[in-house]
C-alpha cells in the first residue's frame, strides 16, 4: 500500500442537520401522533417540517404536549392559540371525545399541513458516551406562532434568555481558572510557539 496524497482532491461538504435549530422558522405541521410515555402518560407528538431547500427535505422538530389531567389545561391553551392563528378554531371546538387517543386522532387532520411562522425554544441535551452536547428544538411555551403574513413579525427569540434556550448547568470543573497565573505568563507570542508559523 502506498501512502501519498498526490493527485487526491477532496470536496469539503458542509454538514446540514436534519433538525431545526432553535429560533423562528416558517414551517408546516407534518404530523400529529398519539403516544404514551414509558410510565403510561398519554401525549401528543407534533412534528414540524421547515421549508425544504433545493432537493433536500425540510428540517424537522418534535414537540410533546401531554394529555394527562394535570397537563390538559396547559395543552388546551396551546391548542386553542394554535387553532385561532391557523383559523381552525371552529373545527377544534367541535371535537368532543372521551379518550386522549381518540382526541389526537380527531385533532390531527385539522392541523396537518398547516403552515405558519413558529418560535422553537432550545434545550441543551448532554451528549452520551463522550459525544458533544447538542440542542433540541421544540415549540416555545408562549408566543410560539403567528400567521405568515404578519408584518413585522412579533415573534422574538433571545438565545440568552432562559425561556428561549435552556442550558445545562456548568460544573465547577468546567469553569476556566487562571490558578493564580496571570494571562501574560500563560500566553506566548514567541517564535518558539509551535502553533504560530
Image: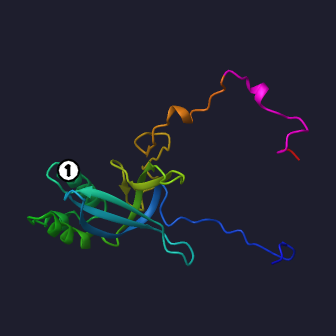
Q: Is residue 116 left or right of residue 53?
A: left
Majority secondary structure in the magenta region: loop
Q: Residue furthest left?
A: 98
Query: Which quarter of the figure has residue 118?
Result: bottom left
Q: Residues within 10 Å of mark 1 (few under 14, many from 20)?
A: few
**147 over 8 or under it: above or below:** above
Q: How is the image coloured?
A: rainbow
Tell me where the magenta segment starts and ends, as one range.
Answer: 180-195
Tell me where residue 121 appears, x and y as whole percent.
42, 50
Tell me where residue 131 appears, x and y as whole percent.
53, 54
Q: Residue at x 55, y 78 (%)?
A: 55
- Seen from the viewer's position, the closer of residues 193 and 166 is 193
In magenta stretch: residue 81: no
Q: Is residue 86 left or right of residue 73?
A: right
**168 over 107 or under it: above or below:** above
Tell me where residue 155 appears, x and y as whole percent.
42, 50
Q: Residue furthest top?
A: 180
Tell me where residue 195 appears, x and y as whole percent.
82, 45
Q: State which quarter of the image contains the N terminus.
A: bottom right
In magenta stretch: residue 193: yes
- Seen from the viewer's position, the closer of residues 110 and 74 is 74
Q: Is residue 111 left or right of residue 123?
A: left
Q: Residue at x 23, y 54 (%)?
A: 75
Q: Residue furthest front?
A: 1
Q: Residue at x 19, y 59 (%)?
A: 40
Secondary structure of the residue carrying tag 1 is loop
Residue tagged 1: 71
Q: Residue at x 54, y 33 (%)?
A: 173
Q: Residue furthest right?
A: 191
- Seen from the viewer's position, the closer of residues 86 and 30 is 30
- Seen from the viewer's position, the closer of residues 160 and 127 is 127
Amino acid at each position: 500500500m502506498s501512502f501519498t496524497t498526490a493527485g487526491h482532491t477532496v470536496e469539503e461538504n458542509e454538514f446540514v442537520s436534519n433538525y431545526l435549530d432553535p429560533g423562528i422558522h416558517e414551517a408546516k405541521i407534518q404530523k400529529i401522533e398519539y403516544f404514551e410515555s414509558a410510565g403510561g402518560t398519554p401525549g401528543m407528538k407534533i412534528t414540524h417540517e421547515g421549508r425544504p431547500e433545493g432537493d433536500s427535505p425540510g428540517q424537522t422538530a418534535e414537540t410533546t404536549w401531554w394529555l394527562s389531567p394535570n397537563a390538559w389545561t396547559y395543552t388546551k391553551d396551546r391548542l386553542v392559540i394554535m387553532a385561532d392563528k391557523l383559523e381552525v378554531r371552529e373545527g377544534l371546538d367541535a371535537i368532543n371525545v372521551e379518550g386522549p387517543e381518540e382526541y389526537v386522532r380527531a385533532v390531527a387532520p385539522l392541523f396537518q399541513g398547516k403552515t405558519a411562522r413558529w418560535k422553537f425554544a432550545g434545550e441543551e441535551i448532554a451528549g452520551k458516551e463522550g459525544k458533544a452536547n447538542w440542542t433540541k428544538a421544540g415549540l416555545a411555551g408562549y408566543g410560539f406562532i403567528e400567521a405568515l403574513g404578519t408584518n413585522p413579525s412579533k415573534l422574538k427569540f433571545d438565545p440568552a434568555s432562559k425561556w428561549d434556550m435552556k442550558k445545562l448547568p456548568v460544573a465547577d470543573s468546567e469553569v476556566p481558572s487562571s490558578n493564580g497565573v496571570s494571562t501574560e505568563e500563560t500566553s506566548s507570542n514567541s517564535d518558539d510557539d509551535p502553533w504560530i508559523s
